[in-house]
Structure formats: C-alpha cells, structure tokens
Amino acid sequence: MDSATVSSKFQVVIPRKARDVLGLKAGDKLIFDYRDGVVAILARPADFVEFMRGLGSEVWKEINVSQYLRGERET
C-alpha cells in the first residue's frame, strides 16, 4: 500500500506504482468516483464510447434480445 502527503495547495504526487497501473503520463486527465466514503481515481479514457462498450452485457447473457424487444414493442 502506498501513501502520499497533501501539500498546503492540496496537491499530491501520485505514487509510481499507481501511475504504472493507470498508464499515466504527464498531461493525462483523471476521473474521481465517490462511493460510500471511498474515492476511486481512474484514468480518463480518450474515447468514452469505446470505454463504455460492453457495460452491462452480463445482464443480457440469459435473455434472447430479439424476443425481448419484440415483446416490448407489442406492449
């Protein structure tokens, strides 16, 4: 586990391991996600459409999509 110190200007140096894991380089943007008192830092993707591709796909694994859409259109 790494740690960092917050400066008087509220700046921190991102530890090398975190930079490597996120693939960060100078000038990259970050996203902060806040959930239940935890802050997750993510590298901002260059293409959000590509980043979101497949999100929620596990929901549709057991469902016949064509049949589902047909049923929705009939209602």
Image: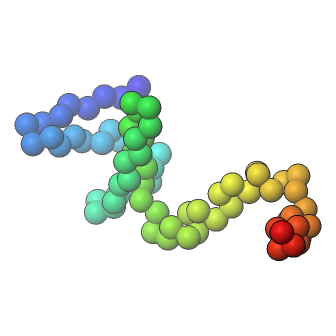
With respect to residue 50, does 13 lie above or below?
Answer: above
* Left/right of residue 20 with respect to residue 74 in the rendered view: left
Residue 22, image x and y in percent?
45, 50
Residue 69 or residue 43, whichever sits in front: 69
Q: Horizontally, is 56 left or right of 29 in the view?
A: right
Residue 33 drawn above or below residue 54: above
The tally of labels here is 0
* Residue located 44% across and 32% down the image: 36
Q: Does residue 16 appear in this view?
A: yes
* Residue depicted at 83% across the width and 74% down the height: 73
Would residue 6 be found to the left or right of residue 42 on screen? left
Please name the colour scheme applied to the rendered image. rainbow
Q: Position of residue 11 (x, y in %)?
A: 17, 43
Q: Is residue 69 left or right of residue 33?
A: right
Please indicate, yes or no, whether residue 69 appears anywhere in the rendered image: no
Quadrant of the frame with the C terminus: bottom right
44, 25: nearer the viewer: 44
Residue that appears at 88% across and 67% down: 71
In the rendering, at what x and y percent does residue 51 appear? 56, 63
In the displayed image of the protein, which residue is found farthest to the front?
75
List the single residue furthest toward the left: 8
Vertical position of residue 2 compared to residue 73: above or below: above
Query: In this orientation, which residue lies closer to the viewer: 57 or 65?
Result: 65
Which image quarter holds the N terminus?
top left
Report the residue at 7% width, 37% height from top. Answer: 8
On screen, 31 above or below 34?
below
